[in-house]
Amino acid sequence: MPRAPSFDKIVTKAAPHVPYFTPRQPAPAGSFRGAHEAPLLFTPLRIRNIHLANRIGVSPMCLYSAAHDGAATDYHLIHYGQYALRGPSLVIMESVAVTPAGRITPHCLGIYSDTQKAQLKRIVDFYHSQGKVIGPQLSHAGMRSSCLPLFYDECDCPVDDERGGWLEEVEGPSVSAEFPHSRALGAGRIARIVSAFKEAARASIVDCGFDFIEIHAAHGFLIHQFMSPLGNKRTDRYGGSFENRIRLLMEVLDAVREVRAETGRDFPIFVRISASDNDESNERSWRLADSVRLAPLLAAHGADLIDVSSGGMQAAHAPHISQRDMARRIKRTVERTCLVSAVGGITDGKLAEDLLQQNYCDLCLAARGFLKEPGMVERWADQLGADIQMNLQDGWCFGKVWD
């Protein structure tokens, strides 16, 4: 245990990046500080230019709480701020739309206006004041845009213009019986959406100061709609074959990678995929074998981490294969070229440690667990007998003192 400093030598130091006082932390909360060897869960991980204090992250969670102009509010600063003060080493923000029409709901975040960027930067600056890492999940909802927040309706109920929607602007890969107001995207519109992802990535890194980018290619939104035969009925170069159906994702990934080269900032790129439509018996769905085939291509095109989830293209289907097993299959495919994260019901420290030790993944993500228990990482550390750093304001209450 570190010794308490002599009081006559204490100099109060302010944390950087914010215009108000908060004490400079001796190390990011969640850092291992024990004398013995750390559990794998609490060992650092470097991904390009970011350094993670441990292998635990907060998975994206839609909050549907943005202002009507798509800007973050104090709600987001408080919601995300709680994790900056606690033990997870990184946070992937909720879906952040790259265009106004790409929002899931009228209350989803965007990153295409100066107001939006300024509000997001407040959150990023607070994270950096605590020595923490945060990045946005850039997305376009496609034919599932202009819907009600799911806390009102879990069936993608469309929102008309009178209630702040934009049904006349909703577009996807193909005409859809489920979303009859959606139109099929033309090639020119697809190119503009790719450009919007690129500009959103640039704004994220340059204007907002985010540490990494996640491309949302999962859960039935636009890129996943193109990937899955359940949503893609096209006959042009974006439809039909596997290579054509993944074309939009690869173009977006290449565009974001160009930002890395053009800005000279070596930020990591994550890609979240639905590893399966959870309909493995259906040859006309996206299946785990497709994701295993896709993974090396993502690595070859510059992805640093594949964030493995599942489902979203159809009414809720329980996965026949657990998301952890999906992550393990994908990790075996890209063992030496790309990192892999696992998510889904990881609410126990021993389980998370086992997943890492047994090579299911490199990083454990959780979402609902953190909603119920923001201090979940501290409990995991107790389960594994790991002494971890807490922020100064909380840690002293537990008898932790600092050099």
Image: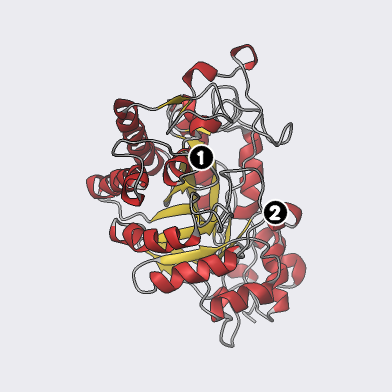
Judging depth in this view, the residue of 222 and 73 nearest the camera is 222
Crowding near the residue tagged with mark 2, few <14, some 14–19, many ≥20 C-alpha atoms within 10 Å: some
Q: Looking at the picture, how far across and down is residue 24, in whole percent?
A: 55, 57
Q: Is residue 353 visible?
A: yes
Contact? badges 2 and 1 (CB < 8 Å): no
List x then y, in percent, for residue 232.
Answer: 44, 39
> At 58% across and 54% down in the image, what residue appears?
279
Q: Position of residue 236 (x, y in %)?
A: 30, 35
Crowding at mark 1 (Cα within 10 Å: few <14, some 14-19, many 20+): many
| SS at badge 2 | helix
Horizontal side of residue 199 vs 371, given as left or right = left
Amino acid residing under circle 1: Phe
Query: Could you tell me which residue is drawn at 69 percent across and 68 percent down?
Result: 378
Amino acid, disc 2: Arg
Look at the picture and state if 261 lies above or below 10.
Answer: above
Residue with the mark numbered 2: 368
Judge by depth and name the residue closer to the eye, 76 or 152: 152
Residue occupying the point 61% across, 77% down:
353
Image quadrant assignment for residue 223: top left
Front label number (2 vs 1): 1
Q: Quadrant of the C terminus?
A: bottom right
- In terms of image quadrants, where is residue 333? bottom left
Residue under the image location 48 percent in, 45 percent down: 136
The residue at which mark 1 appears reads as 221
Nearer-N-terminus badge (2/1): 1
Number of marks: 2
User: Can residue 29 be seen?
Assistant: no
Q: Residue furthest top?
A: 162
